Amino acid sequence: MNRSVESVNMMDAPDIIQYLKPNELLLTTAFAIKESPNDLLELVRQMADKGCAGLGIKTKRFIAEIPSSVLQLADELAFPIIEIPLDSPLGELTTQILSFILEKRTDELRYALETHQAFSRIVMEGKGMPGVMDSLSALILHPVLLLDHRGQVLAESRSTRSLSSDKQKGIARHLESALPNRVCYFSLLAGKEAVTAFSVEIYQQRQGFLVVLGTMLEDPFSVLAVEQAANVVRFELMKQHALEESSRRIKNEFFADLLDEQMTSDEEILNRGRHYGLQKRQTYKCIVAEIDDGSEIYSKKFVHQEEAIRQFRDQVYEHLDDAFSSLKKPYILFTKTHHFMMLIPVEASQATQESEEQDWNGILRNIQDKLYRELEISLSFGVGNYAEQLMDIPTCFQKALEALRSGYQSKKTRFIQSYRVKELTELLRMIPYKNLKQFYDMTLKGLADSTDREHMDLIQTIAVYLENNCLITETAKQLYIHRNTVSYRLNKCEEILGRSLKDPNEVLKLRIALMVRSLLLA
């Protein structure tokens, strides 16, 4: 009796099943199968499998009565069989049923149009989404709230009681499992409170939810009211998203000017950047993120389609924004070219900075793992040093970019690379081998690659002499030889090299040549 009849059909051929739809009522005189009761059994079985609403059979014309085997099968399948009297024309019955269905649909459409217009007026009057929630709650007599894709409350009716953290977690857990269902029903706190949730597509396939508390909402007109509210909310959220995109573009342009050093004073930076959370007496940590192999992804996955690439990067931006937002810590996120940039306010003290750096490394690692798990995107971070003045921010970001490039030069992916001042050996490694070898040979000349024992002693003496800041006595002690022997060896070196070991420039060249020697022999 609870089956919904959405359409009606009449049977004039035995192969009618392929033309039937779910929730359709079939009327027949059974003329096509009057000689074959088994065909009627098969029809009932097929209609039940297809989800049809029921079967109406006119008796006393072509069949005297409905076979008991058919009635028994229908009872087993919980499938309705309706016996139609001989004096009831099927055409007239079909017309009456269709008229009833159309009248009901007309009422529903009229109601949907009226509620949509009412909700739209509320938005145009400036009452926004809270006004829509209040009006919807008054229509369906239940409290309602609107959640975004993060599970955060965007708006709620005045009748909604403040939700406890347990209830919020319970709703969020059910909604995660509900996607991509349009409507889902569940209960909170051991079934004590029924909840109905309607999905609302916000933008870029992100789902929000209109949640009705206190009922498993099934009344057609109440469901229509919620759906119309969802339509109005969807357009309002799309408008807000367009405004957010415009604001984000303006923010990106401001920070691009800042990083390109187009601003000349802290006051100018502060006047324009105060809106984005910049503060004058605040130390900031600078972080840069980049998608690993981004250019390859753009060329292969999106075939350089600019709109698809933009949406992909927006998706990554939104996930980063979600991740940082969930930390309940202040942050500033923006983009420049293909990089995602973050400014993190930190404490000024050295001890606190070291502690926070460890915390942020763990946070960034969790963000990396989540992005890779949910979007299969490999993201790497370069972490710069600290900007104690607003004018220091461009330099801080340059250090973060340098750290990022250093990680990529080491052929790493999904890494977190912190900036540190390069040692001389690291700088030397960046010079091509051919150039290093040429400098080494020209500086040490005959001592460069010699395997002669005397030459090797001379190289060792120079190295120890330079390590001891050119002190002959300390060199002699470390080599366990007489100081005169040291003097003799040093004079011999000057003859072979044609250099004075008293010239600071020549001494510097020798120091570098010996460091190069250790790299070449490694």
Image (cartoon, rainbow, N blue to C red):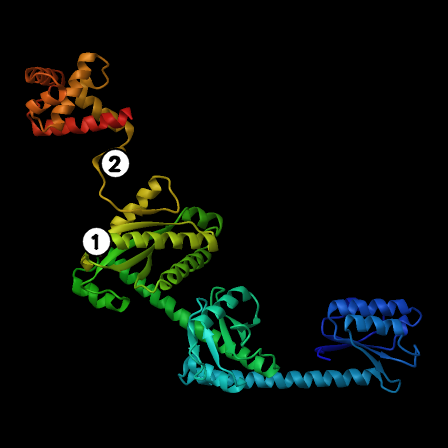
- Judging by the rendered image, the residue that carries numbered circle 2 is 426
> For this rendering, which residue is in front, 364 or 380?
364
Say what secondary structure mark 2 lies in. helix
- Checking the image for residue 351, the label placed there is 1
Q: Residue at x 76, y 78 (%)?
A: 8
Q: Residue at x 75, y 67 (%)?
A: 49
Q: Position of residue 252 (x, y in %)?
A: 31, 61
Q: Is residue 365 above or below residue 213?
A: above
Check disc 2 and give the amino acid type: Glu
Give the total number of marks visible in the rendering.
2
Q: Is residue 305 above or below residue 43?
A: above
Q: Is residue 369 above or below residue 331?
A: above
Q: Earlier in the sequence, mark 1 or mark 2?
A: 1
The answer to whether residue 14 of the structure is visible from this angle is no
Q: Position of residue 408 (x, y in %)?
A: 35, 43
> For this rendering, which residue is in front, 24 or 158?
158
Seen in the image, is 511 located left or right of residue 406?
A: left
Say what secondary structure mark 1 lies in. helix
The answer to whether residue 493 of the structure is visible from this angle is yes
Q: From mark 1 to mark 2, how far is it between C-alphas?
A: 28 Å
- Checking the image for residue 440, the label placed there is none
Seen in the image, is 403 located left or right of residue 482?
A: right
Q: Position of residue 440 (x, y in %)?
A: 21, 24
